[in-house]
């Protein structure tokens, strides 16, 4: 896996939207390695390294026929669990060489995303409990590729002190710059973080997200992380609307990452869903513009950055992340 710690291979990463894996093969890159995804004969997603064991051709440039992936070079064909089911140049009476089979990797669909684990999973996909609650609707967005390191993205997602500055074009204009004392805790079985209140500028497109109300509103929020690269934020509006936002990043290489976010809400989004997604895309575009100005990984070691009280969540994430990759 190149320059990434071996321990990262044992976690789940969102690598594609579920709808992007359709009738043909889908190439994804994770931890400096290329993978191919396709839907097998039963419709479930299959994942393997994007290389044919015969002559190392990229399988993602092949075709899928009735759930079977055919290599574009010599036509070797692979089915469920990556089993090689046909070598066209050999008689059907000749057994397929054992080494012709692909190593099928851990892959599953959750929250409208395809998650891949290159190694033996050490933890499950982060649990977002409201996904099973019929009172909530889910809104998905397209996968994005950012020219930013995953560590800088998680640092940003855990931070609120940038709101009045980075997000002045959306919700941050009226926010107090002083961050009250942050107390970290286990928010649930999956996410570790903090609860807080924030005053937002509730005008224009922000009212779509908040469901209306005054031009200045207070949100009760929580933000927490699940190692290695997933953050969940919850927002309780004064009018009873509850929004949950899952932000997850997957390292492509040291300076590029895939990013996906998923929204859950307990109100009727049949008419406003597209506008809500459009507003949240504006917000993450502000983050992206800032992060793509920064180069390299966020320094992870103590003293590598100058930190203050408001940076407490990121400091704790970095501490736990260091322990993970040093195992």
Image (cartoon, rainbow, N blue to C red):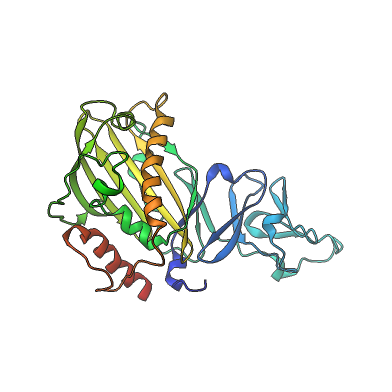
Q: Horizontal and vertical percent for residue 116?
A: 51, 57
Q: Quadrant of residue 148?
A: bottom left
Residue in the picture at 63% in, 45% down: 42
Which residue is painted at 41% across and 65% down in the image? 295
Q: Nearer the viewer, residue 314 or 47?
A: 314
Residue 287 shows in this picture: yes
Query: Percent from the top left, x then y, of residue 113?
Result: 48, 47
Mark yes or no: residue 327 visible: no
Q: Where 276 sits versus 249, above or below? A: above
Q: Quadrant of residue 326?
A: bottom left
| Outermost residue to the top | 271
Image position, residue 309 (x, y; %): 16, 60
Q: Relative to residue 282, is residue 80 drawn left or right?
A: right
Q: Nearer the viewer, residue 3 or 298?
A: 298
Q: Closest to the observer: 72 or 216?
A: 216
Q: Quadrant of the C terminus?
A: bottom left
The image shows residue 248 at horizontal and vertical percentages of 40, 52
């Amino acid at each position: 896996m190149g320059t990434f710690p071996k321990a990262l291979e044992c976690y789940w990463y969102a690598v594609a939207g579920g709808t992007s894996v359709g009738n043909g093969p889908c190439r994804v890159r994770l931890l400096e390695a290329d993978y191919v995804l396709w839907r097998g004969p039963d419709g479930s997603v299959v994942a393997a390294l994007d290389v044919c064991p015969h002559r190392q051709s990229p399988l993602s440039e092949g075709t899928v026929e009735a759930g079977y992936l055919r290599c574009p070079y010599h036509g070797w064909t692979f089915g469920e669990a990556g089993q090689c089911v046909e070598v066209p140049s050999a008689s059907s009476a000749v057994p397929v060489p054992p080494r012709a089979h692909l190593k099928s990797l851990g892959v599953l669909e959750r929250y409208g995303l395809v998650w891949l684990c290159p190694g033996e999973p050490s933890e499950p996909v982060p649990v977002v409990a409201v996904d099973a609650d019929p009172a909530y609707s889910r809104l998905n967005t397209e996968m994005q590729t950012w020219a930013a390191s995953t560590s800088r993205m998680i640092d940003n997602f855990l931070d609120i002190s940038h709101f009045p500055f980075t997000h002045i074009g959306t919700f941050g204009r009226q926010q107090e710059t002083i961050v009250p004392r942050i107390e970290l805790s286990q928010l649930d079985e999956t996410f570790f973080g903090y609860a807080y209140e924030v005053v937002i500028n509730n005008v224009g497109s922000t009212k779509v997200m908040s469901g209306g109300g005054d031009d200045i509103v207070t949100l009760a929020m929580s933000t927490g992380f699940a190692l290695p690269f997933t953050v969940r934020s919850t927002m309780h509006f004064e009018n009873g609307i509850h929004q949950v936002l899952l932000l997850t990043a997957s390292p492509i290489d040291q300076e590029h990452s895939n990013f996906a976010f998923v929204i859950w809400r307990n109100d009727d989004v049949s008419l406003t869903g597209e506008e809500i997604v459009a507003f949240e895309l504006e917000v993450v575009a502000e983050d992206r513009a800032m992060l793509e100005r920064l180069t390299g990984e966020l320094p992870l070691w103590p003293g590598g950055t100058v930190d203050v009280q408001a940076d407490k969540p990121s400091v704790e994430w970095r501490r736990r992340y260091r322990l993970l990759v040093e195992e």
